[in-house]
Amino acid sequence: MRVAILISGRGSNMAALIEACRRPDYPAEIVLVISNKPDAKGLETAAAAGIATKVIDFRGKGSRQAFEDAATQALEDAEVDLICLAGFMRILSADFVGRWRDQVINIHPSLLPAFPGLETHERALQAGVRITGCTVHFVRPEMDNGPIIAQVAVPVSNRDTADTLAARVLTYEHRIYPLALELIASGKARLVDERVIVDEDIAEQPALAVPPLTDAPR
Ligand code: GRF
């Protein structure tokens, strides 16, 4: 499966996907990284890994359409089968999501449908949840919404700040994004009636076990 990754910044999830794709038996390859920000750190990481990169930088009025037209052209030219959003900070239009229907997945640092949108960890702490986590899902036009492919629950500590919680959740993001991509690319996870059905019992995947707080980075 030919995969493109869309980023806007650091690109640590992108790096985790690139690393996973190095495995000879991994069923996907990253053929293109697109950033909407010229200074995204992840661009250097991708280039250093020998992956083609493209900056599509449009701002202001009409920029969404211009961005999406240029992105679709680049994705078609690269014969991309699947698009992974990884810290990509633009909202995609219903037209774009329709053009790439069931071919766009995203990672979000909460147990969706709880806490969609920005400032996820601040809001999780504010709500006093004992468990948060991260989710990989198919993209639908509504933000942070769509059929769930994989989730990991991550415990919250009394001592957590938004930063410590974000750092802990991120370590698990780096595990489930490669796993979710593998499930999709291998055909072990499929969309049926707007739910993702997984051949193997996904709960038994060690990467998806709920980690004890004592094991978590502090
Ligand atoms: C991650 O927490 C991801 O879940 C969210 O934005 C952050 C991006 O981090 N959508 P990185 O660019 O992958 O390091």
Image (tube, rainbow, N blue to C red):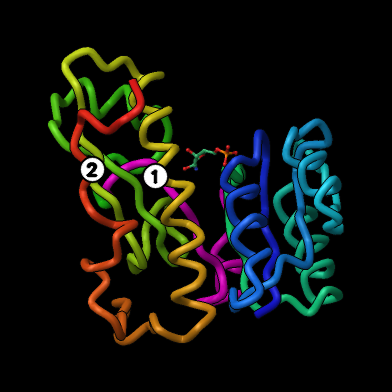
What element does badge 1 sit on?
helix
Q: CA distance from mark 1 to mark 2?
A: 9 Å
The residue under the point 27% across, 47% down is 111
160 vs 150: above or below: above
Residue stretch rendered in magenta on the structure: 91-111
Q: Nearer the viewer, residue 71 or 197?
A: 197
Answer with the quarter of the image where residue 195 lies: bottom left
Answer with the quarter of the image where residue 206 lies: bottom left
Residue topped by disc 1: 172
Looking at the picture, which amino acid does disc 1 mark? Tyr
The residue under the point 73% across, 59% down is 68
Q: With 31 as the anchor, is 156 left or right in this view?
A: left
Looking at the picture, which amino acid does disc 2 mark? Pro
Q: Position of residue 199 (x, y in %)?
A: 30, 85
Q: Is label 1 in contact with label 2 (beta carbons under 8 Å)? A: yes
Q: Position of residue 187 (x, y in %)?
A: 46, 86
120 vs 101: above or below: above
Mark nearest the camera among 1 and 2 is 2
The residue under the point 40% across, 84% down is 188
Q: Is 100 covered by the magenta stretch?
A: yes
How many residues crowd mark 2 within 10 Å: few (<14), some (14–19), many (20+)? some
9 vs 33: above or below: above
Q: Nearer the viewer, residue 171 or 64?
A: 171
Q: Quadrant of the C terminus?
A: top left
